[in-house]
Image (cartoon, grey):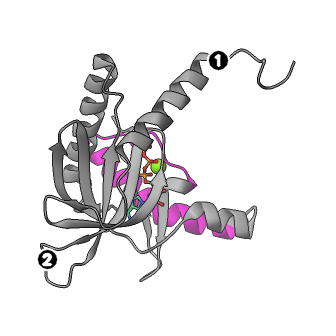
Amino acid sequence: MTIQDSPLKLSDYRDASNRQSRRRHLHQPGHMFRERYRIVKVLASGGFGVTYLAQDGGIPGSPPCVIKQLCPKVSNPLSLERAKRRFRKEAKVMAKVGSHSQIPRLLDYFTINDGFYLVQEYVPGQVLTREVRRAGPQGEREVKQFLSEILPVVKFIHRCKIIHRDIKPPNIIRCGDDGRLVLIDFGGSA
Ligand SMILES: Nc1ncnc2c1ncn2[C@@H]1O[C@H](COP(=O)(O)OP(=O)(O)OP(=O)(O)O)[C@@H](O)[C@H]1O
Ligand SMILES: [Mg+2]
């Protein structure tokens, strides 16, 4: 049986539908949101939406910020409702825990037509995925060092009665300015 002949799984339909939805909602560099945020480039395109690097024209010097856009499948009221809930939850959680120096601050939150947007502080640097790939398996000393840097953030979140539920290398940024670890992506938190 060739790939073309093989029956599609339910997840294939879901993935294809999400991809289609993301393409429909994708904004190009230069696009303005609310006459304030100008898109610079796409940072990532994930399961639930698109993440952009943008400039905040409402602040002198137009500093960079990150805009996370949720792309729900509007044809399906159930997924729209679920996406809305997820989006509101992510904003609420970020507003609650964003005071920590190792979590990006929530700067803004808005909806335009059927699109949902969450604006957060930009953390310059690289996600840990690259570090892990480059350095390979780590020794005891490095692992202890990593834990001593990340566990205080986890402890802080738990004290706020929140569980992140998606801590992994792509959701941790090593800040290029001062080397601190920053935990991102509260989209799946509870
Ligand atoms: N505050 C930030 N500063 C710099 N880069 C960021 C920031 N937030 C996200 N990014 C970049 O965008 C990527 C995707 O962001 P994020 O993990 O929040 O979305 P996602 O995994 O697509 O979302 P979800 O799991 O909610 O669908 C990150 O891996 C990172 O490269
Ligand atoms: Mg992520």
Q: Secondary structure at mark 2?
A: loop
Q: Residue at x 55, y 22 (%)?
A: 13
Q: In the picture shown, does residue 13 fall above or below 171? A: above
Q: Is residue 188 above or below residue 103?
A: above
Q: Secondary structure at mark 1?
A: loop
Judging by the rendered image, the residue that carries numbered circle 2 is 59
Q: Quadrant of residue 152?
A: bottom left
Nearest to the observer: residue 12 or residue 138: 12
Q: Amino acid at mark 2?
A: Ile
- Label 1 near ligand 1 (CB < 8 Å): no
Amino acid type indicated by mark 1 = Lys
The image quadrant that residue 60 belongs to is bottom left
* Numbered label attached to residue 162: none
Check the image and name the residue furthest to the right.
1
Percent coordinates x, y for residue 15 in the rendering: 54, 30
Q: Is residue 59 left or right of residue 154?
A: left
Residue at x 47% of width, y 79% of height:
176
Q: Position of residue 42 (x, y in %)?
A: 43, 60
State the predominant SS element of the stretch in magenta: helix
Residue behind mark 1: 9
The crowd level at tag 1 (other Cα within 10 Å; few <14, some 14-19, many 20+) is few
Magenta segment: 141-169
Choose between 111 and 23: the one closer to the eye.
23
Report crowding for label 2: few under 14, some 14 to 19, many 20 or more residues within 10 A (C-alpha): few
In this rendered view, identify the residue nearer to me: 132 or 73. Answer: 73
Residue at point 17%, 43% (across, down): 111
